[in-house]
Image (cartoon, helix red, strand yellow):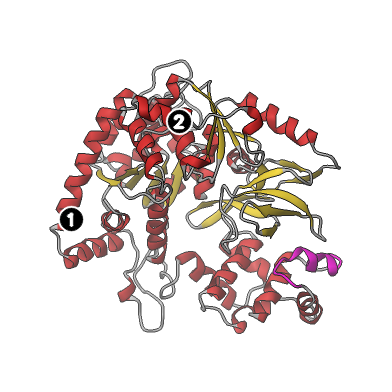
C-alpha cells in the first residue's frame, strides 16, 4: 500500500493499524494525517509506547496520558480511582482521535489497561470509549520489555480484535536505495537468512583500527555506550564546555521529556568531538541523525559543527515540547546534539544514518540486530564489530502474523480502490463533522468556520486550529503575556506560532506590532542589521541582554 492510499483510509475515521518496514514512511504518513486533522479543527491526542518515541512525536507516553503510570495490572477499583482524577478525566473526555506510536513496544496488558480507563471515563461501551484509534509501528522491531515475565504483543489483546482495525501496510522504501542491502534486510525480516546474506554482513566486519572515527557506534547495552563516550571525549585536548538543559512546565511532564530527549541534560563537548544532531532543522540544514565534528565555537560560545558533507552549521538551543489538545504542557531546551561515539540500539530506533559502527556480539533481544542495521541507508555505511546468531533473528510469532497483516492490507487496498473518489470524500466529511471539525469548503466567506466544536467557532480558513486561535488572541489587543496566558501556552510558543503564520503569508504588522514594547524597535533593528546570519544569540548579547529573545524575534518579524 502506498502512503497516499493509507492516508485516504486514515481520513475516513476508521480505526487503523499503520505498519511497514523501516524507512517506508510511517512517521511521514501519520504526520500528514495529524496536519490534516488540525487543519480541519480536530486536535488529535498523540501518544507513544516509550518516552523516546513520545519525544519524537511531541506527545506523551500512553502510560502518562491514560493515567496508568507504571502499573503492571489494574483492578476495577484501580480503574475507578484513575478515572476519577479530574485532569485524567478531562483529557480523555476531550479526546477525539488517539494515536499510539511504536505499538510493537506496548504489551497487551498495558494496552488493555489504558483502554479500560478510557472506557470508564467516557462511559461508552466501545473500545477506548468510542475514540478513533490509530496504532503505528512495526512488530519486527523492538518488542515490549519483559522484565522476567512472559509478555504478549498488543495484537494478542481482545481490545485489538474489538477495534476492528483496518491494516495499512506501507510497501514503498524511502530510506535504503541499495538493492543488495535491502535483500539482506528482507531476508532477516522474513526469517530466511541464508549463507549468502550472512556472508554479506561478515564482509562488513572491521578491525578496530579500520573503523571510521566519526560514525556513531551502536551497542545493545548502556554500559558500553557510557564507557565509550566518556573515554573518547577524554582523549581530546582542550577544555570542555558544558551546556545545560532548561525546562518549563509540570515536573512530571518535564521529567518524561528529559528521559526521552536524545540530547542529554548536561551536554559536554570539546573541539574535535564527534557529534550527532538529535532533531530536524526547520530550515532543512540537518536532520535527526546527521553526523559531524565540533569545529569550534561561535561568538556566543555555541558549538560550530562541520558535517560529513562539508557544511558548517552554527547551532543554538531548540525545544522539545509535550503538547496536549493543541497546548504545550511542558518543554525542554538544549543544543540539538549528542556525542556520536556510541548509543544504544534502543535509542537509535526511528533514526536514519549515513554510517554506523554496530556491535551485535551481545545482541539479546529479537529484532535488535534488524533495528540497528535498518538505521543505515546503504550497506557500505555498515561497519560491524561483532555479530551473534540472535542479532539476525526476529520473533518467530511475528513471521506468521506478518502474513496476516499483509493480506489484510491488500484486502483493504482493493476495497478502497473500488470506491469512487466521491464516496471516499463523503466518508471523510462525515468523520470531520462527527469530530466537531469543519471541511475546508465549508469555511464561511469571512474566513471563519461556524461549524461548532465544543461550543466555539473553529479555525480561520486554511489554518490549523492552534495558529488560528493564536492569531485571534493577538488581534484582540492583548499583551504578549496576556496572549500566552489566554492560550495557556509559553510566550516562546506564541512567538513561534506568529513566525509560522508569517511564513505562510497569514500575518501582517498590524496583527502583532502592539506586542512589541514601545521604543525598543530601533535599537533591535540596528542589532539585527549588523548580524550576517539568522542566529539570535549574537543579537541578544550585542544588546546586553536588555531584551528577551521573544522580543527580538517579534522585531525580526517586522523586517520580513
The image quadrant of residue 357 is top right
Counting from the top left corner in percent of width and height, residue 443 is at 35, 76
Disc 1 designates what residue?
A: 416
Mark 1 to mark 2 CA distance (whole Å): 40 Å
**Cβ–Cβ under 8 Å for marks 1 and 2:** no
Counting from the top left corner in percent of width and height, residue 56 is at 52, 47
Counting from the top left corner in percent of width and height, residue 397 is at 30, 24
357 w.r.t. 536: above or below = above
211 w.r.t. 309: above or below = above
- Residue at 25%, 43% (x, y): give it: 165
Residue 454: tell me if it is visible: no
Looking at the rendered image, the disc whose residue lies closer to the viewer, 1 or 2, is 2
Disc 2 designates what residue?
A: 201
Question: In the image, which disc is placed on residue 44?
Answer: none
Residue 298: tell me if it is visible: yes
Task: Identify the magenta region.
Answer: 532-545
The image quadrant of residue 13 is bottom left
Counting from the top left corner in percent of width and height, residue 549 is at 73, 65
* Lateral position of residue 499 relative to residue 428, left or right: right
Amino acid at each position: 500500500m502506498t502512503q497516499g492510499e493509507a492516508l485516504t483510509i486514515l481520513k475516513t475515521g476508521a480505526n487503523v493499524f499503520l505498519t511497514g518496514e523501516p524507512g517506508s514512511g510511517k512517521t511521514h504518513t501519520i504526520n500528514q494525517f495529524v496536519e490534516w486533522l488540525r487543519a480541519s479543527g480536530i486536535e488529535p491526542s498523540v501518544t507513544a509506547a516509550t518516552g523516546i518515541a513520545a519525544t519524537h512525536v511531541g506527545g506523551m507516553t500512553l502510560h502518562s496520558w491514560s493515567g496508568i503510570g507504571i502499573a503492571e495490572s489494574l483492578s476495577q477499583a484501580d480503574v475507578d480511582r484513575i478515572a476519577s482524577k479530574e485532569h485524567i478525566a478531562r483529557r480523555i473526555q476531550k479526546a477525539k482521535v488517539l494515536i499510539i506510536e511504536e505499538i510493537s513496544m506496548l504489551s497487551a496488558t498495558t494496552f488493555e489497561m489504558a483502554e479500560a480507563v478510557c472506557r470508564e471515563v467516557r462511559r461508552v461501551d466501545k473500545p477506548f470509549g468510542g475514540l478513533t484509534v490509530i496504532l503505528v509501528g512495526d512488530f519486527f522491531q523492538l518488542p515490549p520489555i519483559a522484565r522476567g515475565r512472559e509478555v504478549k504483543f498488543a495484537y494478542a489483546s481482545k481490545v485489538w480484535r474489538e477495534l476492528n482495525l483496518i491494516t495499512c501496510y506501507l510497501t514503498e522504501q524511502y530510506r535504503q536505495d541499495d538493492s543488495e542491502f535491502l535483500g539482506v534486510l528482507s531476508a532477516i525480516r522474513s526469517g530466511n537468512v541464508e549463507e549468502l546474506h550472512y556472508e554479506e554482513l561478515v564482509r562488513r566486519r572491521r578491525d578496530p583500527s579500520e573503523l571510521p572515527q566519526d560514525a556513531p557506534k551502536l551497542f545493545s547495552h548502556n554500559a558500553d555506550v557510557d564507557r565509550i563516550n566518556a573515554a573518547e571525549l577524554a582523549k581530546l585536548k582542550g577544555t570542555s564546555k558544558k551546556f545545560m538543559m532548561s525546562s518549563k512546565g509540570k515536573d512530571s511532564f518535564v521529567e518524561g521529556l528529559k528521559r526521552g530527549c536524545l540530547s542529554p541534560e548536561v551536554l559536554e563537548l570539546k573541539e574535535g568531538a564527534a557529534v550527532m544532531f538529535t532533531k530536524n532543522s526547520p530550515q532543512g540544514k540537518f536532520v535527526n541523525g546527521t553526523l559531524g565534528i565540533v569545529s569550534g565555537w561561535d561568538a556566543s560560545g555555541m558549538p560550530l559543527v562541520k558535517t560529513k558533507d562539508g557544511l558548517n552549521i552554527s547551532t543554538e538551543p531548540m525545544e522539545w515540547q509535550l503538547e496536549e489538545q493543541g497546548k504545550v504542557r511542558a518543554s525542554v531546551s538544549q543544543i540539538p546534539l549528542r556525542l556520536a561515539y556510541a548509543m544504544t540500539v534502543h535509542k537509535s530506533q526511528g533514526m536514519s544514518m549515513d554510517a554506523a559502527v554496530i556491535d551485535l556480539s551481545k545482541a539479546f533481544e529479537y529484532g535488535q540486530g534488524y533495528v540497528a542495521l535498518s538505521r543505515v541507508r546503504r550497506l557500505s555505511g555498515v561497519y560491524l564489530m561483532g555479530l551473534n546468531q540472535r542479532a539476525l533473528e526476529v520473533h518467530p510469532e511475528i513471521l506468521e502474523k506478518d502474513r496476516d497483516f499483509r493480506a489484510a492490507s491488500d484486502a483493504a487496498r482493493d476495497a478502497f480502490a473500488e470506491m469512487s473518489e466521491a464516496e471516499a470524500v463523503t466518508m471523510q466529511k462525515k468523520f470531520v463533522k462527527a469530530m466537531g471539525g469543519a471541511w475546508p469548503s465549508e469555511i464561511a466567506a469571512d474566513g471563519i468556520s461556524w461549524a461548532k466544536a465544543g461550543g466555539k467557532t473553529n479555525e480561520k480558513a486554511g489554518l490549523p486550529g492552534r495558529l488560528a486561535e493564536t492569531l485571534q488572541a493577538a488581534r484582540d489587543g492583548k499583551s504578549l503575556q496576556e496572549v500566552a496566558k489566554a492560550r495557556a501556552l509559553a510566550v516562546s510558543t506564541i512567538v513561534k506560532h506568529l513566525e509560522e503564520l508569517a511564513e505562510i503569508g497569514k500575518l501582517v504588522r498590524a496583527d502583532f506590532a502592539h506586542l512589541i514594547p514601545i521604543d525598543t524597535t530601533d535599537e533591535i533593528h540596528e542589532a539585527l542589521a549588523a548580524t550576517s546570519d539568522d542566529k539570535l544569540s549574537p543579537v541578544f548579547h550585542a544588546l546586553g541582554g536588555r531584551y528577551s529573545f521573544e522580543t527580538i524575534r517579534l522585531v525580526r518579524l517586522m523586517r520580513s
